[in-house]
Amino acid sequence: KQEVTQIPAALSVPEGENLVLNCSFTDSAIYNLQWFRQDPGKGLTSLLLIQSSQREQTSGRLNASLDKSSGRSTLYIAASQPGDSATYLCAVMTAKTGANNLFFGTGTRLTVIP
Amino acid sequence: EAQVTQNPRYLITVTGKKLTVTCSQNMNHEYMSWYRQDPGLGLRQIYYSMNVEVTDKGDVPEGYKVSRKEKRNFPLILESPSPNQTSLYFCASSLTGGRPDAIDTGELFFGEGSRLTVL
């Protein structure tokens, strides 16, 4: 069974700093990897999706990379802002017989200090 | 606007009183799924559906039922709720769920969540 781990569980940085969030997974036979943002008590907003054939995706100040062979993905946030404060979740979709499934990490809670 | 809509958003109920959480999507997605989110455990899949009349168990299906009679709707049914089902529930949909024979990125769209408390 796929296991997804996110380290650290929480991170505080001063505004303006660049930062990296880490995600690791145990089974490299993945279909895609998605990074989500979740604000307290709210739903999940998709940030970036990397398909298994891709190495990275970029959107604005966000860049996500994927290394299937080592079972790792990183989410890079440039020039962090207080509005980036949220929990960031990594999710791996794996292909299994007859259907697909999505496995989530427990998230990294990011606080950007003004 | 493309969206996944869940109702109710908040619900407090008592043990044993049957309840249904509705989920509807307007994107003509084949794949729909239910998750629960608990502190320290992250999101865990309850049930999923690859298409109309096709449903399957996820990681934590005990105590839940689902049905998929129409493509747009995927209700989650708690026949006899218990306190350990107190949680934040999310419905999600995807074009095909990343089906290998489909041209689909597998991107998942989530509803806003339904916070359920069982006393």
Image (cartoon, grey):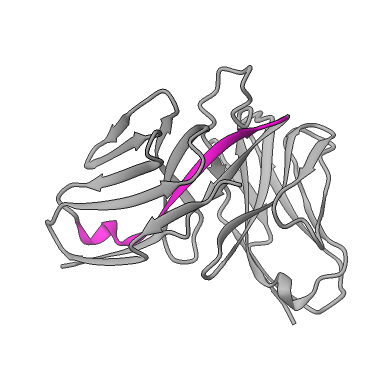
Between B68 and A96, the one nearer to me in the picture: A96
Q: Position of residue A24 (x, y in %)?
A: 40, 48
Q: Position of residue B63 (x, y in %)?
A: 82, 63
Q: Is residue A57 magenta?
A: no
Identify the residue at horizontal 72%, vertical 57% (top origin): B60
Mostly what secondary structure, the magenta segment? Answer: strand
Q: Is residue A87 magenta?
A: yes
Vertical placement of residue B83 versus A88, above or below? below
Horizontal side, residue A28 vs residue B81: left or right: left
Between A37 and A4, the one nearer to me in the picture: A4
Vertical placement of residue A97 versus B91, above or below? above
Identify the residue at horizontal 55%, vertical 23% (top origin): B104
Quadrant, the C terminus of chain B: bottom right
The stretch in magenta equals A81-97
Q: Position of residue A6 (x, y in %)?
A: 40, 56
Q: Position of residue B55 (x, y in %)?
A: 80, 40
> Within the image, what quadrant is residue A67 found in?
top left
Between A78 and A90, the one nearer to me in the picture: A90
Q: Residue furthest left?
A: A16
Identify the residue at horizontal 67%, vertical 44% (top origin): B33
Vertical placement of residue B35 versus B99, above or below? below
